[in-house]
Image (cartoon, grey):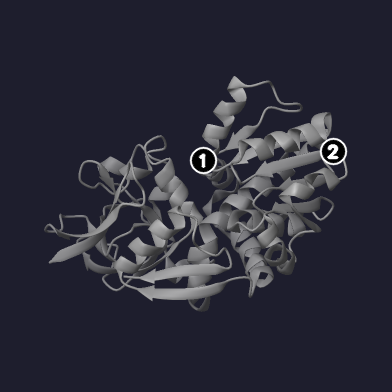
Amino acid sequence: MNAQQVHVRTGALTDAVLAEVPLPPLPEGAVRLQVESFSVTANNVTYAVVGDGFRYWDFFPAPEGLGIVPMWGHARVIESRHADIAVGERVYGYLPMASHLDVVPGRVSAGGFTDMAAHRQPMSPVYNSYTRLAADPEHDPAREAERMIFGPLFRTGFLIEYFLRGEGWFGAEQLVVTSASSKTAMGLASVARQSSPGIKRIGLTSKGNVGFVEASGLYDAVLAYDELDKLEVLRTVSVDFAGNADLLARIHRHFEDALAHSVLVGATHIEARSVFGKSEPLPGPRPQLFFAPDHAVAFFKAHGPEEGGRLVAAAWRAFLSAAEGTIAIERLPGLDAARTVFTSMVAGQIDPAKGIVIEP
């Protein structure tokens, strides 16, 4: 029996091929998953762009010079040599751009398990955890596509709001986010609207996306990037999803000392951060990188898995209601479609109003 995998050249992300590899005999204690569906979003492109620095290429090994991009999606157990995991069970979690994945379940509970495969242990436990759908408070069979498309990015937005609220929003009156059309930014705006209604939410986006962002109803105001100077200078927290060094510099110079805190989200911002380190210091606070997996570990340590899961699930359901109709879901069969969509997304050719689901 063979598996299909999409192999991406790590040094040239638009170079991707569909490969067949033999599936080895399943060892004792392991489980074989058949990938049912996953989404392809800008988040997956980020994983590939910084794959070496953040070890994203290490989750799912590939031949030298090639990598398998991680995805979030659903899978079904088709073979099990683990006493507590049954054939036919469905899970949600971190999957390869491939047809199959073998895992070694550990820390098994009614709600999920952790893949204890040796090569995955150096990476964040957030990425190694799989949710068993039969006992998952976030799972809605009718909204699986939305969960794959928005879910991981929503969680990052949830954690950003949780962090900022825990810091009293650094005394700010308003939140300014770049790339306001991104799914993570929309998640942050939704949670802030629910949990911090006193904070004004300002979305910055490209001219072409202003209408889309306004239609979401998640922001108090939406401006194109060239309208930044129109923003009132109040005590402000900025959250940068765009990764554009010039734009971030403009934000700092506009608000200067009124900028209470500056957050960089997504590892693509490491490059922008280094730019600032070599140039004239920016006014206001030094931008701080927000690495969501570390904050997720801290959040669930503080609240426990059950209460933490309940809090996330409640905010998720509210976000789903707010995001209703903001994207058109397109389902595509086969891994070759995944290859095509991913390389197009690397080239910036995918409409943000479209949500892509692949069914291998």
For the residue pair 347 and 342, the one nearer the viewer reads as 347
The residue wearing badge 2 is 235
Few, some or many C-alpha atoms within 10 Å of disc 2 (few <14, some 14-19, many ≥20)? some
The amino acid marked with disc number 1 is Thr
Which label sits on residue 208?
none
Q: Amino acid at mark 2?
A: Arg
Q: To which quarter of the image does residue 217 belong?
A: bottom right
Inter-mark Cα distance, 2 to 1:
26 Å
Q: Is residue 247 left or right of residue 142?
A: right
Element type where label 1 sits in the image: loop
Residue lying farthest to the bottom in this orientation: 142
Q: Position of residue 204 (x, y in %)?
A: 72, 51
For label 1, count other residues whose C-alpha is less than 10 Å away and answer few (under 14), some (14-19) or many (20+). Answer: some
Q: Which residue appears at 82% of the width and 50% of the height?
A: 199
What residue is rendered at 55% in x and 38% in y? 269
Badge 2 marks a residue whose secondary structure is: loop
Front label number (2 vs 1)? 1
Query: From the viewer's perspective, is residue 349 above or below residue 268?
Result: below
Position in image of residue 190 (x %, y %): 70, 60
Residue at horizontal 43%, vertical 71%? Answer: 134
Q: Which residue is mark 1?
A: 268
Question: Is residue 65 at least partly visible in the picture?
Answer: yes
Q: Does any portion of residue 92 appear in the rendered image?
A: no
The image position of residue 61, as x and y in percent, is 25, 46
Vertical arrangement, residue 212 with respect to residue 232, above or below: below
Above or below for 205 versus 145? above
Q: Position of residue 182 (x, y in %)?
A: 60, 56
